[in-house]
Image (cartoon, grey):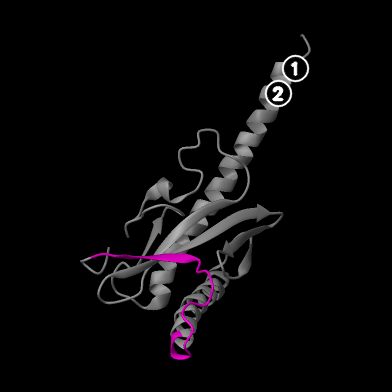
Amino acid sequence: MSEPTRFDRLALAAGRYGEASLDNYALVRSLAERIGSGFCKYLGDDKKCVHLVPPEGPFTPMDHGSGAFSVSGKGFLPLGAIRFGLAVRVSETGDWIRIVMSAEKEGPDLDVAILGGENFAFRLPITEDRLQEFYAILFKYLTDWFDDQANHYANGSYGGGPMGFEFTHSDNGDG
């Protein structure tokens, strides 16, 4: 039996990388989907109030499937942090905001960073208790931003720095 060629070794290394990148994507996507469904329940809204959306560019408040992730359409998946957007309904009249998050596996943890907000480490496997802690941080991030902006206005200063999300409107109020 002949010794593997350099190409064989390269293909083996690329295959290992590919498996790791698929595992990383599956971890991030699973967490994003759990956040998408769980955060709406956490808010106590009886309508669909959270959707996974692209992390940049135009968006509509509807689930975008794999298009909600920064690696969508990349072919060979890059191994590293993956960004995704979360559209959250913030009014009864159909106003939505997009929050951008980035997630990546770091050893036994899946680290999530809220753009403009806190970082949060989920120990794998992810527990429901830990998700509830994250929902509380996400809720605080949103309410603090709105409160800060209103306070800046009340005190004569518009805007309080860059925000980690964007607004959109949907006429039917539930995406």
> Which amino acid type corresponds to the residue marked 1 in the rendered image?
Arg
Q: CA distance from mark 1 to mark 2?
A: 6 Å
Q: Tell which of 123 and 25 is nearer to you.
A: 25
Which residue of the protein is positioned furthest toward the left in this rendering? Answer: 172
Asked whether 9 falls inside the magenta stretch, the response is: no
70 vs 81, left or right, is left
Residue tagged by mark 2? 10
**Residue at left offset 44%, top offset 80%:** 146
The secondary structure that most of the magenta stretch takes on is loop
Q: Label 2 neighbourhood size at 10 Å, few (<14), some (14-19), many (20+)?
A: few
Say which quarter of the image contains residue 116.
Answer: bottom right
Q: Nearer the viewer, residue 150 or 47?
A: 150
Residue 124 sits above or below residue 3 on the image: below
- CB under 8 Å between callouts 1 and 2? yes
Q: Which quadrant holds the C terminus?
A: bottom left
* Identity of the residue furthest to the bottom in this view: 155
Residue found at the very far front of the displayed protein: 156
Tag 2: amino acid: Leu
Instruction: Look at 63% across and 47% down and name the residue there.
Output: 80
Which stretch is magenta? 153-170
The residue that label 1 is drawn on is 6
- The image position of residue 74, as x and y in percent, is 50, 37
SS of the residue at dot 2?
helix
Dot 1: within a 10 Å radius of its alpha carbon, few (fewer than 14), some, or many (20 or more) residues? few
Q: Secondary structure at mark 1?
A: helix
